[in-house]
Amino acid sequence: MKAVARLSLLLAGLLLCALAELALVEPARAESPGRQSSKSTAPDSAAGLDVQDLLFLGPVRPLVIRLHVTIDGKPFREEWQARFDELFGLEDRDGDGRVTVEEATSIVRDMNGGLRDAPQTDVSAIAPAAAAGDQASGDKKDAKAALIDRALLFAHIEKTLPPFSVRRRAVVVRDSAAALFPLLDTDHDHQLSSAELAASEGQLKQRDFNDDGVITPGELILDPTAIAAAADPAKADRDLNADEGVVMVIEASTTPEQIADRLLAHYDRNRDGRLAVTPPQLEVSLPAPLMGRLDANSDGVLDRQELGHFAEHRFDLELSFLLGRASAAESRRQQRVAVDEGLRVRKKLRDGYKLELGDAEIDFNRDNRDPRQADLVEFRTYDRDNNKYIDANEAASNNVGKAAFAVMDADGDGKVFKGEFSSFMSRQNAAAAVRLQLEVKDSGQNLFKLLDVDGDGVLSQREQRQAGQVLAGADKNHDGLLGGDELPQIIEFVLGRGIDENSEAKTGPSRLVVRSAAKASTSGPLWFRKMDRNNDGDLSQSEFIGPLEIFKKLDTNGDGFIDREEAEAVK
């Protein structure tokens, strides 16, 4: 009996201890990481470490897209933090949670994930001022003697080398698409009437520089900046401002005011500091329940203060991405949730999504390349003179940062041999493997694609003349006008690991689609092919070298063109 009593007391004591520990645990926040108020709070639960929220700015409607991303079955933020912990542990030899400026610089460099110098590598600025006179002891004594706390360094790296970032890509076709709409919108009301579309052929003649009757994307580009972008797409990539794109990364530190400012910058066309939510001045379209919550005074416009409450909006879409290795069970658990019934999401075969969002169409793809498996034979591409080492000039011409080259050149002889290069790259690839990047290619509201009925990359005379006919199929609200969400914004997202630094290699020369003359030159009678100088498969009156009476006789349907069938019918 005494043994039983002692056992009961022991169990009771253990229970009380457990309850005491539970009382000290902070309750899980209802807020999700990246969707919090002005107070900056890092994700605080294992379930939230895989979450990244994005604000997508469509032509007329903003959406919040929530991503759930894992790397090798683990939340991506957890993997990023594990890499930081590993590097910090290697430098913090005495385990006191502090490192010197030199050691912190080494950690920053190895969290970069690339050959270019990491931004803000001078971490002495974040060292506490009081530490300047604090003499360290042991192996941490150096000239500066400033010690940086682990949490302080973590916050610095999370801001400058974040686990998730967005990179915009220049799309040359966007410039031609953007030029076409205002060219046809002769009354400048941001909409196209049936009359304006019907007049397309006459309006586009001013851009037919070679007088062949066919309009190419290049002929629509008059802006010198756009022409330069077509010639040097890599430079166009570098010149893009991430703050002006269609995607905003919502972090734990993002404030409601920042979201409101981004919404105003994107949608406030008349720059009055407010967004009109009702026709005819409508600038932004929101679901009725959300509109009711935001428009507190029911005046039909949203000011900056009201837009600040948009941060309380949870999310419209929820998508999952599995990077690296994933078990069959994890793949089966991969889900997506479309909150708004007006949004259509289709899962693609290769772990991506096709999103139809009313005013936008997004092709959302996954790049599952693992930077840790990079081929180190790449050394040969840097060693241009093939002398078995990389010198400073070769490094600079390959976008290798000066600080990175100095670290690789461990013996300071100005030469980086393959072993030195491979050692440095293995550390950078380990960091790149835990840094996610969303690549965004925004082709804009592509009227060109809508008018290019046969999809051959040019606007033929027939397509220009029949432009008015596209209104019947594209006029969703049946108001006789084409505009707003009736011209979907075409966007491609690619989510992958690693911070892409070689845009020059990936982007390459512009490859606008041009008509292939092969099909036109082998179809129809010889006389038809000879006259069809622009190879568009039709003979216009200007191309036909015979009398007008003969042209009208051969044009049996009276549409102003002699097509291949009509030509073949000639006896």
Image (spheres, rainbow, N blue to C red):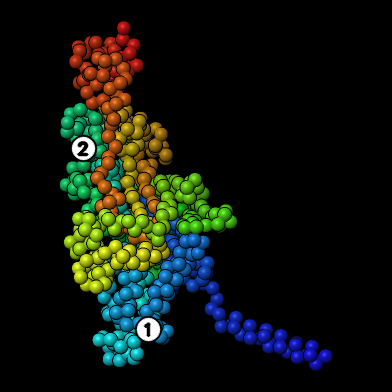
Q: Quadrant of the N terminus?
A: bottom right
Indicate which label's residue lies in the foreground, 1 or 2. Answer: 1
Which residue carries the number 1 mark? 98
Residue 448 on image: x %, y %: 30, 38
Determine whether, in the image, residue 430 is placed left or right of residue 341: left
Q: Position of residue 81 (x, y in %)?
A: 43, 71
* Residue closest to the eye, 526 or 371: 371
Q: Position of residue 281 (x, y in %)?
A: 33, 50
Which amino acid lies under the numbered mark 2 shown in the image of this protein? Glu
What's the residue type where badge 1 is placed? Arg
For disc 2, the marked residue is 219
Out of 176 and 147, give the one closest to the viewer: 147
| Residue at image location 31% in from the left, 7% down from the top | 571
- The answer to whether residue 307 is above or below residue 463 is below
| Residue at image coords 27%, 68% | 408
**In the rendered image, is residue 304 in sight?**
no
Residue at x 17%, y 33% (from the top left corner) = 209
Where, by quadrant of the figure, is residue 264 drawn? bottom left
